[in-house]
Amino acid sequence: MISGLHAIIFCDEPDRARAFFRDVLELQSVDAGDGFLIFKAPPAELAVHPEPGSQGRHELFLMCHDLSETMGQLESKGVQFAGPVSEQR
């Protein structure tokens, strides 16, 4: 049946977002032309939740095995967390 999934993140600063995925998260990518990078994603999940009036809203959850270690690695690359970070089940 379905053999893959392609997701798109829309943003005002695509070069900055691409640099984050490429340089900070170190995701492998291919250039689809004109600097449009397609990133290889780790195993993924897709959820659909009801929320009236949610046009344009999205959330991205990044999964890791050791939250403290991963946060330290990201902070060493200049990542600043905008709010509290918590472990989810």
Image (spheres, helix red, strand yellow):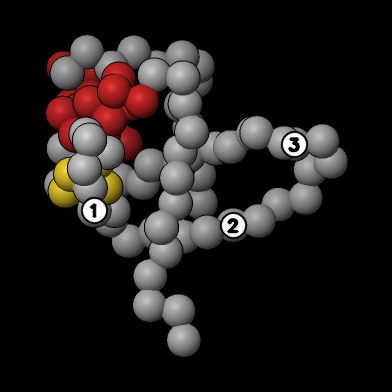
SS at circle 1: loop
Residue 36 position within the rendered picture, expressed as x and y whole percent measured from the top left:
27, 38
- Is 56 drawn above or below residue 79 in the view shown? below
Disc number at residue 40? Answer: 1
Amino acid on which the number 1 mark rests in the picture: Lys
- Is 67 drawn above or below residue 12 in the view shown? below
Work out which residue is located at the far front of the displayed protein and give it: 34
Amino acid on which the number 3 mark rests in the picture: Ser
Discs 3, 2 touching: Cβ within 8 Å: no
Asked if one can make out residue 77 in the rendered structure from this viewpoint, the answer is yes
Q: Which residue is mark 3?
A: 54
Q: Which residue is mark 2?
A: 47
Q: Quadrant of residue 16?
A: top left
Number of the front mark, 1 or 2? 1
Asked if one can make out residue 25 in the rendered structure from this viewpoint, the answer is no
For the point 65% across and 56% down, the residue is: 48
Discs 1, 2 touching: Cβ within 8 Å: no
